[in-house]
Image (cartoon, grey):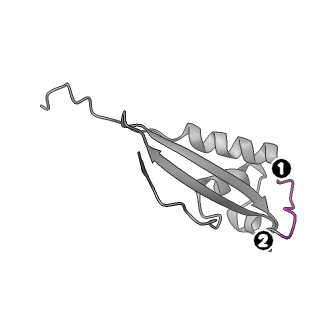
Amino acid sequence: MEREPRSPVAPDDHVPARELAALGGLSVAALRSQVRVAYAKVAEFQARGAVHVHAVIRLDGPDGPDTAPAGGATAQRLAEAVARTAARVAVTVKDPTVASS
């Protein structure tokens, strides 16, 4: 099983931050002044060809992990933002048994 190298904790420049801002009725800039979304992820490529992703997502305050998030940023709201983001992800795979035209 091949693994992608572990990603360091990353800044909030991903879609879940945009979803979290939208759920709070904020712009992304306003969200970033109140909350920092940090995450680590690992993608595993399974033998059957599927990609399996593990992620840990954390809400920090605007100054990092030593400060609490503000602006109504809760675990429930983060879970909803992640679910909305995941629902938009799609992969189209060509059936290898069908001849190309």
Question: Residue lying farthest front?
Answer: 1
How many labels were placed on the picture?
A: 2
Q: Identify the disc placed on residue 59.
A: none
Secondary structure under the numbered disc 1 in the rendered image: loop
Q: How far apart, in angstroms, are the residues tagged by discs 2 and 1? A: 16 Å
- Main secondary structure of the magenta stretch: loop
Q: Are marks 2 and 1 in contact (CB under 8 Å)?
A: no
- Does 86 sit above or below residue 56? above
**Residue located 54% across and 52% down the image:** 42
Reply yes or no: does residue 29 show up in magenta: no
Q: Picture coordinates of residue 55 (x, y %)?
A: 62, 50
Q: Picture coordinates of residue 83 (x, y %)?
A: 65, 39
Q: Which residues are magenta?
A: 66-73
Work out whether residue 32 or residue 59 is closer to the camera in this orientation and state it. Answer: 59
Q: Picture coordinates of residue 62 (x, y %)?
A: 79, 70
**Residue located 86% across and 53% down the image:** 72
- Does 90 sit above or below residue 78? above
Secondary structure under the numbered disc 2 in the rendered image: loop
Q: Which quadrant of the rendered structure holds the N terminus? A: top left
Q: Picture coordinates of residue 26 (x, y %)?
A: 76, 58
Amino acid type, label 1: Thr
| Mark 2 vs 1, N-terminal side | 2
Residue hosting label 1? 74
Amino acid type, label 2: Gly
Work out whether residue 78 or residue 55 is closer to the camera in this orientation and state it. Answer: 55
Residue hosting label 2? 64
Within 10 Å of disc 2 (Cα), the crowding (few <14, some 14-19, many 20+) is some
Give the quadrant of residue 94: top left
**Residue located 71% across and 61% down the image:** 37
**Residue located 73% across and 67% down the image:** 32
